[in-house]
Amino acid sequence: MGRGIAQLFAQAAVPTVLFDSQPTALAAAIQSIQQTWASLREKGRLSAERVDQARALLQPASSLVDLEGCDLVIEAISEDIAAKQQLLVSLEAIVPAHAVLASNTSSLSITALAAALRHPERVAGFHFFNPVPLMRIVEVVAGARTSPELPARLVRFAQAAGHRAVICSDTPGFIVNHAGRGYGTEALRILAERVAPLHVIDRILREQVNFEGQGFRLGPFELLDLTGLDVSHPVMESIYHQYYQEPRFRPSVITAQRKAAGLFGRKASAGFYTYVDGRKIEPAWPNVEPLNGPERRLQSADRGVGAVSESAPESAPGSAPESAPGSAPESAPGSAPESAPDRAPQPAPELSAAAAEEPNLSDLRVWIAPLPPEHPDSVLAELLDYLAQAGVAVSGAGASEPAHASNPAASAAQQSTGGVPPSNALIVLCPLGEDASAMAARLGLDATRAIALDTLFAFGWRRCKLRSLMSTVTTSAVMQRVACRLFSLDGASIALLNDSPGFVTQRVLAMIVAIACDMAQQAVGSPQDIDDAVRIGLGYPAGPLSIGDALGPARIHAVLKAMHACTGDPRYRPSVWLRRRADLRLALRGAT
C-alpha cells in the first residue's frame, strides 16, 4: 500500500520520499508508479505537465536517514506490532521534533504502537484503503496520548490530496472494519439457518435492496470470495475477540471450516462459488412448479426457496423466467453441487386432501393480515394496488384498516379484533422482524394458508425485479405455488424463503444500522463520519445511518426488537441510541 500512498501525494504536488528496506522492492515500486502515470497521461486523465511534476517530486530513499527532513512519515509495513514499534522508535530519533509519525495500520492499536516512543503524542493512525488513489477515504485515528491538534493536521493534509478524512477513536476496526461486521456475519447466520441458498441471498441483496436506484454491488458471499477467507475470517475473529465476544460480531463456523479446507474464494478458484478461468459459475435459480402444473409438489429440492418455472401456462400474463439474468442452467458444465451449508434440502410436502384442487388466479381471494403499525402507509397502498393490477379480490383487516394511516394505537387494537379470512383465501402477512409462523400464531391465523411478503423496499406492480416471499413451517405446497404465481405476474423473479425472523433484507440491513448506532453511541466517530466512511470505504449504496433514515428509524427498531424477541439472541438487541431517536422521530445521520 505504500506505493499507492506515495503516488497519491506526489500526484497532489507534495514532495514525497519513498523508502523500502529491500532496494529491489523500492525500485519496482518507483517503476510501477511511473508506469501508472504514463498510462493516466495516455488516457488523458493527467496532463504531461502534471506527470513530469509528480515524477520530479517522488524520490527514492536509500536509508531511513534520508527521511530526516520530512514533516510527515507514514509507515505501511506488515501488521506486526513489534516491527512497527521498532520502526517508529528509529524514526523518532531521525525526524524533526515537529514531524508527525503516522501508521497505516488497519488492525493494531495506535495507543499500543505509540507506547514504545518517548513522545507518543506525535503518533496517530492514518489508514488508507486500496487502491489508495481511487478509494478517496482515510481514517484519522487518535490514540490515548495523541496530541489533540494532530488529527486536524492530518485531515487538512488528506483533504489537500483530494481524500475525505474521517476522525475516529482508537477502537478495534476503527470505523470501516468495525461497521462492516454486519453485512457478512448476518448473511452467514442466514445461510447457517438454511433460510436460503447463498446465491439467492446474494441476489436479494444486490437486486431487492434499492436506495435511489443502487443496491449492494456484490452479495456478501461474492464479497467474501473476492476478499478471500484467508483474510476475512481472521478479521472476523480478531474483531470479535477484541470486543470481548460481543454477540453482534460473532464469527461463523462456516467460514472457519471453509478456510481450513482451503476454499478461500477466487484466488483458489473455489470458495462459496466455483470459478473456471476466473469466471464465477452461477448456480441455477431454484424453481417452484407453477400453478396448475402437472406435478402437485415443489419442483425444487429446497422446500422453501424457489421461483416460478418458465413452463408457466401461456394464459398467465407477464410470467417470470425461472433463472436470474446470466445464471447457468442446471446442467451447466463445470457447475458444482452445493455443499451442505449452502442449501436447505427438505422433501417437497405432499398435498393434503383439502388442497386437492388448486384455485385459478381469477378465482383467488387474498386476505391481508393487519400490518405492524411501524409500516408506513405506503406499504398497504402498494400492496392493494398490486393486487388490483393482478385482478385479485381482496379482503382482510389490513386491507380495510382506516385507522392505520393516522392512528397506530387504533391500528394495533384492530389487529387483535380483525375479521376472519375466508376458508379458501391466501393469507398475506407483512411482518417486520417477525417470522411468518410467529405472526400467524400471534394473529390466530391458519398457518397452512399464510405467506409472508417482504415490504421493506418497493415491491409494487412493475416496481422491482425480485420479490421475497416466506412460508410458515406449515404453508401448503399449493399456497406456496399460488403465492409465487401471484407475485410474479408482472415479470418479477421470486425468492421463496424458509421461515426466518426478518427475511433477508430486514435482517442484514437492521444489523448494519444497529452496529452503526452502537458506534455513534460509543463515539467511535461522528454520525456523519461513520456514514461517509462506510459508504466510500465499503461501497455501500448509502451510509448505514442514512440507510436507517431512509427505511425509518422506528421501522428498523421494530425489526430488531422483533428479531430479539423471536430468537433471544443478544446480537439483535436494539441500542438505546436508536430507540431514543426512533421514539422522538429524529434522523440518525444528523444526530449528535
Image (spheres, rainbow, N blue to C red):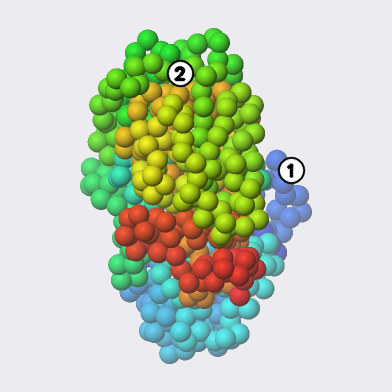
Which amino acid, mark 2?
Pro
Q: Secondary structure at mark 1?
A: loop
Residue occupying image coordinates x 35% and y 70%: 243
Relative to the observer, which residue lies in front, 291 or 528?
A: 291
At a point 29% along the width and 20% down the height, the residue shown is 353
- Location of residue 193 with respect to 9 vertically, above or below: above
Q: Earlier in the sequence, mark 2 or mark 1?
A: 1
Image quadrant assignment for residue 459: top right
Q: Nearer the viewer, residue 111 or 83?
A: 111
Q: Are marks 2 and 1 in contact (CB under 8 Å)?
A: no
Q: Is residue 220 visible?
A: no
Q: Residue at x 52, y 27 (%)?
A: 365
Foreground residue, 219 or 78? 219
The mark lying in front, picked from 2 and 1, is 2
In the picture of the structure, the residue carrying the numbered disc 2 is: 359
Identified at 55% across, 10% down, the residue is 315
State the image coordinates of residue 156 (x, y, percent, origin top left).
67, 73
- Above or below: residue 368 compared with residue 251: above
Crowd around label 1: few <14 · some 14–19 · many ≥20 (10 Å):
few
Q: Position of residue 314 (x, y in %)?
A: 54, 9
Label 2 secondary element: loop
Q: Amino acid at mark 1?
A: Gly
Label 2 and label 1: CA atoms lie apart by 63 Å
Could you tell whether 481 is left or right of 586 in the image? left
Q: Position of residue 88 (x, y in %)?
A: 43, 78
In front of the other: 391 or 455: 391
Mark 1 = which residue? 44
Image quadrant containing the C terminus? bottom right
Q: Is residue 126 left or right of residue 352?
A: right
Q: Is residue 502 above or below residue 461?
A: below
Q: Determine which of the numbered discs, if any, sits on residue 163 in the image.
A: none
The reply to whether residue 476 is in sight is yes
